[in-house]
Image: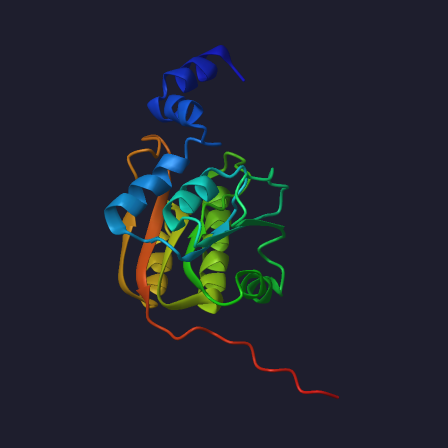
Amino acid sequence: MTGSWLEKRRRDQYYRLARIRGYRSRSAYKLQQAIRTYQLIKPSQKVVDLGAQPGGWLQVAREVVGPAGLVLGIDIKQIAPLPAGNIKLLKMDVYAEDIADRIVAELDGPANAVLSDLAPSIIGAWDVDHARQVDLARRAMEIAEKVLDHDGNALIKLFHGPELKRVQDDAALLFERSRLLKPKASRPESSEIYFLGLRFKAKWYQPAAKVAD
């Protein structure tokens, strides 16, 4: 890390606030701002956070759902435990075939909200980075389709690029309302943008019962 990068981070108001308030990442404020404006998470609800490591979004979601709610964090990397009994952690690849079934089992039913801050390892080749992010966003939406309850909400990270409009249009078909948003806490120079879907139209997907041999 260069001295200039470290100095820039120290001047970042959201980085400073996160340290002061005990959030594990400055990105906690992105979710906090989206919840405040669009109420995509409410008290007592069940929430899934894809790409949850290091846990900043888990902390914010837990604050909103309260002790009667449940938050499930999933990441291919290990997430350090959080001091709350109703935060569950699952070390798992989002491309695993059984991930939707695992989520429903952990939540003991469908989710009220699916969050995804999934992002690829950035290599600096814009077209490759964009394509990888699109693939992750589409995978997050596939999972959301299978685990969201009727009228549930979703917040999914994307990158600006040629496929953005197509992904937005496809995802919008699943919700009563949708839009793209860039929270104030998102760095201005970042190409990230979030798809927000409100009030999932479909009924909750339920896997077909297995037939006994």
Residue 192 location, x and y as percent? 38, 41
Q: Is residue 205 above or below residue 28?
A: below
Q: Is residue 135 above or below residue 54?
A: below
Q: Which residue is drawn at 34% across and 34% down?
A: 186
Which one is in front, 156 or 23?
A: 23
Q: Which residue is drawn at 49% across and 32% down?
A: 24
- Image quadrant occupied by the N terminus: top right
Q: Would you say residue 182 is visible in this rendering?
A: no
User: As drawn, which residue projects farthest toward the right?
Assistant: 213
Q: Would you say residue 195 is visible in this rendering?
A: yes
User: As drawn, which residue projects farthest toward the top?
Assistant: 3
The total number of labels drawn is 0
Instruction: From the viewer's perspective, tell me whether residue 209 is left or right of residue 7.
Output: right
Q: In which quarter of the image is residue 8?
A: top left
Q: Which residue is drawn at 45% across and 28% down?
A: 22
Residue 157 location, x and y as percent? 41, 47
- Image quadrant occupied by the C terminus: bottom right
Residue 130 location, x and y as percent? 45, 45
